[in-house]
Amino acid sequence: MSGPTLSVLLVTRDPDVKLVTANLQADGIASRTVSGTRDLQRALASIKGQPVVAVFDAELATDDGFPLEDIYTKLRNLPLLVLLQTDSESTLPTDAQRNTPEEFARKPITASVLALRVKALVLAAGLPLPIAAPTLVNTQGPLDLRADDPRGEMTVVFSVKGGSGKSTIAANLAVGLATIYSAQTLMVDADLWFGDIGVLLNLSSNRSSFDVCGTDDPDLFALPKATVQHSSGAYVLLRPPDPLSVEKLRLRSFVEALDRYRSLYEHVIVDTHSALDELNLDLLEAATRILLVITPEMGAVHNTARFLGLAERLRFTDKLTLVVNRANSGIGADALQRTLGIPVGYGIVSAGRMMLDAVNEGTTLFAVDPNRRERITQDLAAVVELVAGREQPPAQQPSRGLGLRLLRRSA
């Protein structure tokens, strides 16, 4: 807390690039914008000895008052992110004496993405990210959310049985965090072989988790570039598009990459496959919160009980919240609690055709029902509220038509 303040030097005249100042400030990072050589010289003199990274807008190279090689020399000792023009084919000078990280991005670039690239540059330079102002945590929840950890939360959505609706809940959770709370959110498809998050969110891209963990030494700069932005504002790390590449993926590097993503996003939501293999055990260990999804049927209850016994030995239980999907059918909440020995945290009703249509259209219930009129959307919003750690903004109250009372939170 008493050390020098990290700052970002923005060398640009582009008003769209300057918008990143607000994003950086929200993350506790100071910034200074310069638009002339004299301003740059004064800025470099004033920040000497302080932790600084620089963003240079290469569009300035067209200005005779901004000789490119001279600028590169002045910025030689600073970690540097160069913003290239979209249609620029010109090559930039190389500096053999540079011993700090140098990265490139193309314009146009949104303020949120640019802020992520800046934070990745900070980490690559070995500089610590500042601790942003903490968000209010729901003290009624059962978990210790590591209030002393400046990084975002990693919520792992897990189920011991396929077909539980786990992936649908995970996708809606990520979109809900982005739309209801405007939180910087990353959705990760950790079902590396057969994950369907891309299908559920109607996303297709060659960018995937293979881009950040196809080698033993993950490329830190590849972290923000490997993701795809959803229309909700959430970012998504898709599974590898080629199944043959999954076996080449370094699982240890995958888990480490997700841990690093926590420095770039407020929330990292991880959808898993239904197995207790080495990858899932590592993800459950790294999680700050585990949403354990169950359906009210005997097979799922039996296997969930087996998992809970293992979770107790591995000390996962303090991070667990039990979420019952299709809770308006099958075994009741009281019977589930007696059988499993843990309280039902949340219940989500079945929505039949509404949910099926949303899945087939590659959208979420928060897009279909933005005012949260339907009971299932309200139930999903309650789970989003739990993960966000604060009350959700008010939405238009739905009419009462479903006579079924659902247990939202256990006493």
Image (tube, grey):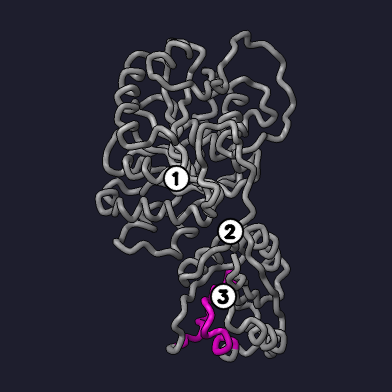
Q: In this rendering, would 315 be left or right of 368?
A: left
Residue 326 in view: yes
Task: Identify the residue at horizontal 34%, vertical 31% (top origin).
Answer: 312
Q: Which residue is mark 3?
A: 51
Residue 304: x, y in percent?
34, 23
**Amino acid under disc 1:** Val
Q: Secondary structure at mark 2?
A: loop
Residue 198: x, y in percent?
45, 41
Magenta stretch, main secondary structure, is: loop
Range drawn in magenta: 71-95
Task: Identify the residue at horizontal 60%, vertical 77% (top origin).
Answer: 56
Up/down of 387 relative to 71, above or below: above
Residue 131 disc label: 2
**Amino acid under disc 2:** Ile
Dots 2, 3 in contact, CB < 8 A: no
Mark 2–mark 3 distance (CA, rounded to whole Å): 15 Å
Residue 363 in view: no
Residue in front for this viewpoint, 59 or 335: 335
Q: Secondary structure at mark 1?
A: strand
Task: Identify the residue at horizontal 46%, vertical 43% (top origin).
Answer: 288
- Around disc 3, counting alpha carbons within 10 Å, would you say few (fewer than 14), some (14 to 19), or many (20 or more)? some
